[in-house]
Amino acid sequence: MLLIYNLIIGEKPKQYFDDVIANRITSNLNIQYEILHLEGQIPKLDNFTHLLLTGSELSASKKNENDDYINFIISHFVNNNKAILGICYGHQMLVKFLEGNQKCRKAEFPEIGWRNISIESNFLFSMIKNPIAICSHYDEVFDLSSDFKIIASTNKCQIQAIQYKNFPIWGIQFHPEMQFSDGSKMISKHLEKFPEDNKFYFNEISNESEVLQNQKIFDNFFNTKAGKKY
């Protein structure tokens, strides 16, 4: 069973993830899931085999009041050799738990928009070729130990995805959950609200169908088993 820890703060995007994205990313497999929010009561974690940590408007480069709750949940999955996939803020919080707070910083050059992602051969990227995905981040992880494999990058962000040792524990800086319409809408709204971020804007997509394959990242993740090496 999958636990989705929805770390989004804004009520409308949080609800959109619950109602639309959660259903979409689990649709290819018969996997049950439960959604937990930051303000929610933590369920019995022994019931879950997989953890998905979402993005958030929060900044991982500084301490937040919810950090202890997030670390408590991550620690259960890590200590019990269960599968974890962190996205954007979730990726950064996962690395901070595993490596320490000093491994997340403000990015010298934030990325906003559609980016070509350079990937390495890895189980998580099985059946993925030349991916393009939404990036939307001000923070980044850096200078990781040899416990981590860097499996994706861009020219502005050296660590776009990691795997911890050879466990089913991954973090992704970009947003594979965003398909063309909702990803484009998210970026458009962001740039309307923060027009100064146009200097960080990328539009490297040529065809909206290029984004469809990103669903395989979730299929691959959900197909992992606790305790198995990948």
Image (tube, grey):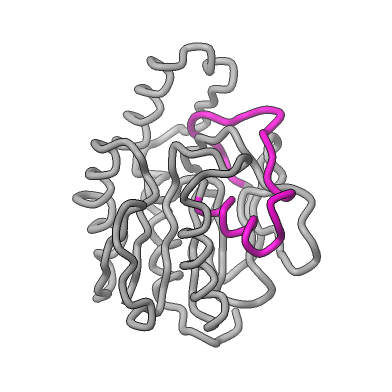
Is residue 72 positioned above or below 156 on the image? below
The residue at 72%/65% (across/down) is 148
Quarter holding the C terminus is bottom right
Q: Is residue 78 magenta?
A: no
Is residue 165 positioned above or below 111 on the image? below
Foreground residue among 211 and 188: 188
- Residue 211 is left or right of residue 62, and the answer is left
The residue at 54%/38% (across/down) is 59
Quadrant hosting residue 206: top left
The residue at 63%/41% (across/down) is 61
Q: Residue furthest left?
A: 19
- Residue 125 is left or right of residue 25, and the answer is right
The percent position of residue 98, horizontal first and vertical second, equals 66, 64
Is residue 55 positioned above or below 207 on the image? below
Quarter holding the N terminus is bottom left
Q: Residue furthest top?
A: 195
The percent position of residue 210, horizontal first and vertical second, equals 42, 44
Is residue 104 positioned above or below 128 on the image? above
Residue range (magenta): 90-117
The residue at 70%/57% (across/down) is 100
Q: How many marks?
A: 0
